[in-house]
Image (cartoon, rainbow, N blue to C red):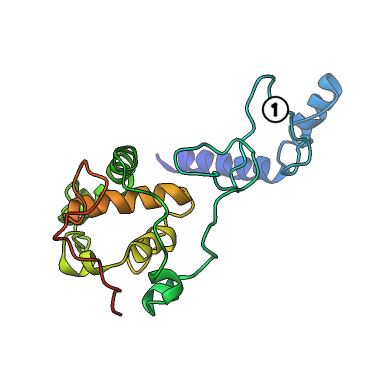
């Protein structure tokens, strides 16, 4: 009783396979006849082959340049900031003086700390926690915790923290591609407030706060 239906099913499968091997050539022929082209012949452009001009009234933005000073936007003006030369993670591992001794060019003003807090909560708190305890949501999911208020982190120099943000180290990825030069220093200033090295709303470290030492290996 089931042989004939199975036979028809087998015949149908063969027809479908045959149609698949033939492809859409007959349909393409009809499309060419009616519309002058088919889906198999589509114009395309390579990247930057046919770019469009910016819309009228837009402001140019030079993403590859640095702003001239803290708190300023780069709108295509010439570079004015003295930016540290590129360095790799090995410079952090080896505590390269060129990175460890970087001077922080951003004063820890109220504006800097507010900006640093905003960026910290946006990009850093997910791992290090809102208060720097290392209890962010990613850490709670099983990632190794690294509290920023630990003696080891407090001992890092400003330049070392800047370098960690810029190129990353170990489990920490690099954020240099999405956090600008001066904003990295703003985050460093805010981290210092979490560590108690700087007051939360002040512009200078407490008198009894020791200078951060160079990190070890």
Question: Is any part of residue 150 visible from this angle?
Answer: yes
Q: Where is residue 164 in the image (x, y as percent from the top left)?
A: 37, 63
Relative placement, left or right, of 195 versus 45 is left
Relative placement, left or right, of 154 versus 65 is left
Please tell me in which quadrant of the rendered image residue 78 appears: top right
Question: Is any part of residue 127 visible from this angle?
Answer: no
In percent of the image, x 56 and y 39: which residue is there?
A: 74
The one nearer the camera, 59 or 103, is: 103
Q: Position of residue 132 (x, y in %)?
A: 19, 53
The one nearer the camera, 127 or 204, is: 204
Residue with the mark numbered 1: 54
Relative placement, left or right, of 15 versus 193 is right
Q: Position of residue 55 (x, y in %)?
A: 68, 22
Q: In which quarter of the image is the N terminus?
A: top left
Total labels: the figure holds 1
In percent of the image, x 56 and y 43: which residue is there?
A: 13
């Amino acid at each position: 009783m089931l042989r004939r239906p199975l036979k028809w099913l087998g015949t149908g499968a063969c027809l479908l396979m045959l149609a698949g091997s033939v492809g859409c050539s007959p349909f393409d022929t009809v499309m060419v006849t009616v519309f002058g082209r088919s889906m198999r012949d589509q114009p395309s452009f390579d990247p930057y082959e046919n770019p469009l001009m910016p819309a009228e009234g837009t402001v140019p933005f030079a993403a590859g340049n640095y702003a001239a000073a803290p708190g300023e936007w780069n709108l295509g003006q010439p570079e004015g900031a003295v930016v540290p030369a590129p360095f790799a993670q090995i410079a952090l591992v080896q505590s390269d003086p060129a990175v460890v001794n970087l001077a922080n060019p951003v004063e820890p003003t109220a504006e800097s700390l507010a900006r640093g807090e905003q960026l910290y909560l946006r990009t850093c708190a997910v791992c290090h926690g809102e208060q720097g305890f290392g209890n962010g949501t990613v850490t709670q999911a099983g990632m190794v915790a690294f509290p920023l208020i630990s003696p080891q982190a407090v001992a890092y120099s400003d330049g070392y923290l800047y370098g960690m943000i810029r190129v990353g180290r170990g489990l920490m990825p690099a954020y240099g591609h999405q956090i600008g030069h001066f904003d990295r220093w703003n985050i460093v200033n805010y981290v210092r407030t979490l560590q108690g090295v700087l007051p939360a709303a002040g512009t200078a470290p407490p008198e009894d706060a020791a200078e951060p030492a160079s990190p070890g290996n």
